[in-house]
Amino acid sequence: MQVLAGFLAVSAAGCGGRARTGERPLEVLVAQDAESLDPRFTMDTVGLRVTRLMHAGLFRLDEGDLHPVPYAAKGVLFQSPEELVVELRTDITFHSGKPLVAEDVVATFTAIADKSVGSRHARIFDAIDRVTADSAHVVRFHMKRPHATLLTDLEMPILRADQAFGPPDSDGDMDGIGPYRLARRTEGEMSLVPAKDSALGKTPAHPITIRVVHDENARALRLLSGSGDMVQNGFSLSLIPALAKEPGLTVHARPGANLTYLLFRTDRGPLADVALRRAVGQMLDRELVGRTLLSGHATVATTVLPEGHWAHTTRPAGAMTFDPEVAEAAITALGRRGTKLELLTSTDRLRSTVARFFAQTLNARGLDVTVRELELGTLIARLNAGDFDMCTLQLPELAEPNALRFFLHSTYIPPEGGNRGRVHDVMLDTLFDDGDHELLPEKRRVIYQQIEEQLARGVYLVPLWHEDQVAVTGPRAATYQPSPEGRWLGLTDVR
């Protein structure tokens, strides 16, 4: 197998500006608090966003096509498909002042893989056999097998060696090498200040406060009053046009690396019939929803992976189309008119509105669909238990296509993973395994094209749309630009 010929040199980023003392921090408004600020355990969206400001990994995602690029790493070398050597940068220190060395990397990945630590991300690193230090700034990853997503997986934040095996620290006191350090956390508020000598290579200009404001109208009022400075994906998209007209507010939008989709229970019940699943998908006017309820801030999905992604397929064979007349005729031919189905959704206003529109559409074409709005915890519990017919869901970050394996491979049925639709497809399993083992991007691209085609044939889910990353900013954060995966690293560029 072809391997990289040598280290990929990476130049350090510019020195950047200095934080301004005594100024009011930039205030980022969010709807929910972070569950945890311990990167070994955090899974929620706000927690991931905040921890990636405080911490940094060996790699991060390119903001163009989302391929992994070195971050704390200076260069990499695959000496074989089962052995990766990483050279560390020598200009990085933890927030405490301790220099980053190979010992910290070894301890971090050894701890995350250790079942006694209990990291929620442990299974990501199943393919790693062990991690060793060749020298103070060279680390070697010994693999059990070739693992295509290794560089993307190494986005996991590096911890200080003496803290890596410690108990969970939800308050965020763990040392990091990210561009911000945590100054204070209280209920509903996190204060971050710029850090020097971080993996980013420059010092942000402004401190940040992340403030929890549950109500979107209250978030809008804080922006309008000048108290708040940035809200990302925190408003109903129907509200965005009105906010864009307000003096001093700016709307920033770019296509997002996410997927909103309709999931089916595929192994039993009426929707075990692929023909019925296809008919349901053909009845849904995704373009109309994107243009109206989403205010044009979404791209109709013909594939699972969004446009601009390095593995995107233009249009796979059998991609879902809007054809309600054909779908209604199919339901009649199948003898499925009047079939009772339950559509689960969250209590989020936009999501429930979309679900009710879908139900109205399906009912008008001969089905009997009821909508059930559930709090997130209850919704996930029902999905994991298989107690559903269909559900609207979103993958908020879809940077690495192998992430789909967790949701569609037959070995990941709950409680082992996220295959809540109970998909059993031998060909799909084989393709996901091939994509996991193949290192060459051009060959992986072909594999994921075949996965897209198999998903279209099986109609295990209906790709609905890829929503834009939409940020609304006040004057002080007017230069902020969102990234396709929704992270907040753009805050470091606000001057």
Image (spheres, rainbow, N blue to C red):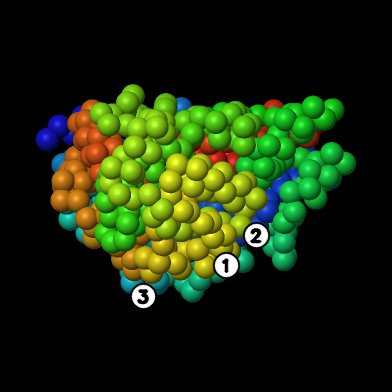
Label 1's element? loop
What kind of residue is marked 1?
Ser
- Image coordinates for residue 170, horizontal then vertical, percent: 57, 67
Please rate how many residues cluster around mark 3, counting C-alpha atoms within 10 Å: few if below 14, some from 14 to 19, many from 20.
few
Q: Pick the residue in front: 184 or 375.
A: 375
Label 2's element? loop
- Image coordinates for residue 50, horizontal then vertical, percent: 59, 51
Q: Image quarter for residue 372?
A: bottom right
Q: Pick the residue in front: 414 or 326.
A: 326
Mark pair 2, 1: CA separation: 12 Å
> Looking at the image, can residue 77 be seen?
no
Left or right: 336, with 22 as reference point? left
Q: Which residue is mark 3?
A: 116
Q: Which residue is mark 1?
A: 170
Residue at image coords 50%, 63%:
379
Residue at image coords 57%, 49%:
356
Residue at image coords 47%, 72%:
166
Please rate how many residues cluster around mark 1, counting C-alpha atoms within 10 Å: few if below 14, some from 14 to 19, many from 20.
some
Q: Image quarter for residue 435?
A: top left
